[in-house]
Image (spheres, grey):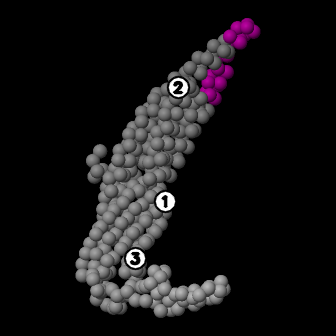
Amino acid sequence: MPDHSYPHLRSMTGQGRSEVSSEAGTLVVELRSVNHRGLKINLRTNDALSAHEGDITTGLRGKIERGTVTVHATLKPPPGQDVPRINQAVVNAYASQLVAATKEIDAATQIDLSTLLTLPGVLTVEDQTDAEDERGQQRRLLVAEGVGLAVQRFNHMRHHEAVAMAVALESDLKTIRSHTDSIEGLAPAVIQRYRERLTEKIKKALAEQQQPTEPVDLIREVQVFADRSDISEELTRLASHLELFRGVLTGTHGAAGDRDQASQPGTEAVGRKLDFIIQELFRETNTIGSKAGNAEVAEHIVEIKCAIERMRELVQNLE
């Protein structure tokens, strides 16, 4: 099946990476995702990007619907652009605690500045210009470019994985249709065999009592069984659910305008909708199995349930 048959599908697992450069420096963005019911973004940046974390998050939302997305973003400014500074307040706090600690244990106070410089928060990289000036704008543009490119590659990989899953889902749909067709063909025979067994049973019982068989009673009993075992409505609903599933999977469900919208990434969580349909497939299949009460039908029901379970596992990884 060609990729363009499923333009709206995305897997919830994937990765993407970008590296872009400008006057603002070199930006590296890495994305990785795993399954999650909603959208959860775990963002990790270096100090040079601390003022632009909101820009990164904004660049992701709307382009990714579901999954836990881990983002690693680092910006390496051009040489000399950012100047390391010592946070004197933090140094004083560390020094005071060291002095107090040495007094507690009655030891000589020896404070090594080189050691202090390695402690968290002592050295900071401060941009020499305001975040709203030209350099801040350059960084925002670089962030938009880097995040956009990473998301593009990320979604390309996710789409490629989703296509493979869609092909497998289509195969399972065909399997289910094949077994439901077989069940539909067996339904009249099930009732006929019951009629024959019941007739023989009644004839034998009445022969022993030397009483004639009453056709009306036989017909009534068979009719009760036929009504109780009628699975035509369940088969019709099952076929409807299968058609709906394929329509959502291929993006052809609904009016033309809906199809146009569905073909755009991020317009809806297809995986969640397919999961709801699978619940209905299970419900109808269970009802058919319990009403039919036939060994041959039961064999087909087992195969259908196996196919639905495979579909459920695949759908849980679709966005």
Task: Give, as a three-letter code, the residue at label 3.
Answer: Asn
Identify the element where label 2 is drawn: helix
Depicted 293 relative to depicted 40: above or below: above
The residue nearer to you, when weighing 280 against 124, is 124
Secondary structure predominantly adopted by residues drawn in magenta: helix
Task: Give, as a three-letter code, the residue at label 1.
Answer: His
Q: What residue occupies the far front of the structure in this picture?
A: 108
Q: Quadrant of residue 23?
A: bottom left
For residue 292: magenta? no
Q: Is residue 77 visible?
A: yes
Q: Position of residue 295 (x, y in %)?
A: 56, 25
What residue is shown at x 61% (from left), y 17% (from top)? 197
Q: Quadrant of residue 73?
A: bottom left
Q: Which residue is mark 1?
A: 36
Q: What residue occupies the far right of the structure in this picture?
A: 209
Mark 1 touches mark 3? (CB < 8 Å): no
Task: Give, as a three-letter code, the residue at label 2.
Answer: Glu
Disc nearer the start of the sequence (1/3): 1
Disc 2/disc 1 C-alpha distance (Å): 40 Å
Q: Which residues are magenta?
A: 204-227
What residue is shown at x 46% (from left), y 57% (from top)? 35
* Closer to the eye: label 2 or 1: 1
> Looking at the rendering, in which quadrant would you find the C terminus?
bottom left
Q: Which residue is mark 3?
A: 46
Q: Which residue is mark 2?
A: 296
**Left or right, 98 with reference to 261:** right
**Left or right, 49 with reference to 25:** right
For residue 214: magenta? yes
Disc nearer the start of the sequence (2/1): 1
* Closer to the eye: label 1 or 3: 3
For label 1, the crowd category at 10 Å Cα-Cα, with few meaning under 14, some 14 to 19 and many 20 or more, is some
